[in-house]
Amino acid sequence: SGSDLPESAPALVVPHHGDGDVLEVRDQPVTEPGPGQVLVRVAAAGVNFIDTYQRAGVYPMDTPFVLGSEGAGEVVAVGENVNCFVVGDRVAWGQGRASAQTYALVDDTQLVQVPPNVDLEIAAAAMLQGLTAHYLSTSTYAVQQGTVALVHAAAGGVGQLLTQMIKKRGGRVIATAGSAEKLETARERGADDLINYSEVDDLAAAVRELTDGVGVDVVYDGVGKDTFDASLESLRPRGMMVLYGGASGQVPPFDLQRLNKLGSLFITRPSLGSYVATPDELRARTTELFAWIESGEVQVTVGGRYPLSDARTAYADLEGRRTQGKLLLIP
Ligand code: NDP
């Protein structure tokens, strides 16, 4: 089956942990899929913040390794015991390894079929951040009619999708972002109230002012270190703090008594893996996500497409807070 495949092809390699300059594009061998594996010709690979944690060693990895959790493309070969996929299928994944390359090997348990009406680039853009926004708004805290949510970095990849899903469920979104332009994007995605957190002195006070002094039901915080304290202080009694990332850095160790003092708060630090832990749950969430995309209820914004050879620029832009929506690498 693989006779027409090249022996090697370009891949984005992390030779050792470090900053964005360590990234290198190198030819890597193209290998036949093993049992349970599928070889995909990658149409687009997603750029995610988790890639920067893996590159930097915040999440330690064995080096060297090929970067990238997410992608979409066409199946070119299948290994033994793969029953649900055949050569030619259009597929996507959000929890893979070594996705930022021309040919990626993916476990069939991580793969989903892309509906015919969904573009492969949109599928690549939607998997990791879209499934994250899905579980955050439907499961971690099940937003209902009238729920008041504070969403940080609302013009970002997860932020724009989360904003739309909260609005779709009848919630109210108080959005933060670092510039007027980004806040305008958040408004276009449905945000009700806008706060430029680079300009306000007291973020929690600004949130309280918008909620008649009460505070919000839930905070979705992927910024972490810089926003964490204000996020806690923005919650109503018994509200829920959802710390789902650390774009500004990881939150340091935390005194649980603070939850008591601020009014019996809840706190969770979720990750996508536990919310798509079985193929059934992965398929159920993805089916719903793609249906929303096909109907136009949820819009996926690709904020930048970069050739694989320009991956350093993509990550520099992401870490430099210069981006909105989703960034893609095109091998
Ligand atoms: P984004 O597109 O949201 O980019 C990050 C944004 O964070 C920036 O654009 C910026 O927006 C804001 N930000 C604030 N402070 C900083 C800083 N010091 N450095 C960089 N950015 C900063 O990225 P993603 O959508 O890929 O990821 C968002 C968060 O979600 C990340 O923390 C990521 O780890 C997390 N995540 C968690 C998952 C989970 O399951 N737990 C799954 C997927 C993502 P602004 O300029 O408006 O401040």
Image: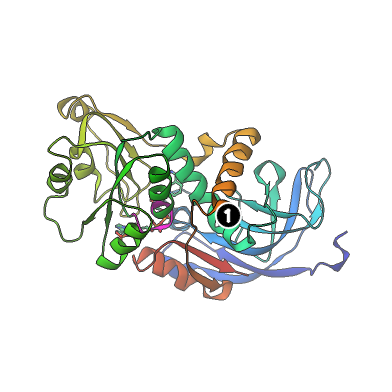
Local crowd at mark 1 within 10 Å, few (<14), some, or many (≥20)?
Answer: many
Q: Residue at x 45, y 35 (%)?
A: 138
Quadrant (top left, top right, bottom left, bottom right) of the N terminus: bottom right
Where residue 61 appears, x then y in whole percent? 52, 50
Residue extent of the magenta highlight: 154-159
Residue 12 position (above or below residue 186): below
Where residue 46 appears, x then y in whole percent? 54, 60
Where residue 196 appears, x then y in whole percent? 21, 59
Question: Considering the numbered disc 1 on the image, is that residue within a helix, a strand or a loop?
Answer: loop
Horizontal relation, residue 64 to residue 244: left or right: right
Determine the quadrant in which ligand 1 lies.
bottom left
Residue 257 position (above or below residue 285): above
- In the image, is the residue at mark 1 within 8 Å of ligand 1 by its beta carbon? no
Quadrant (top left, top right, bottom left, bottom right) of the C terminus: bottom right
Res 66 seen here: no
Horizontal relation, residue 28 to residue 76: left or right: left
Q: Which residue is mark 1?
A: 70
Front residue of 264 and 130: 130
Would you identify the image quadrant in which residue 263 lies?
top left
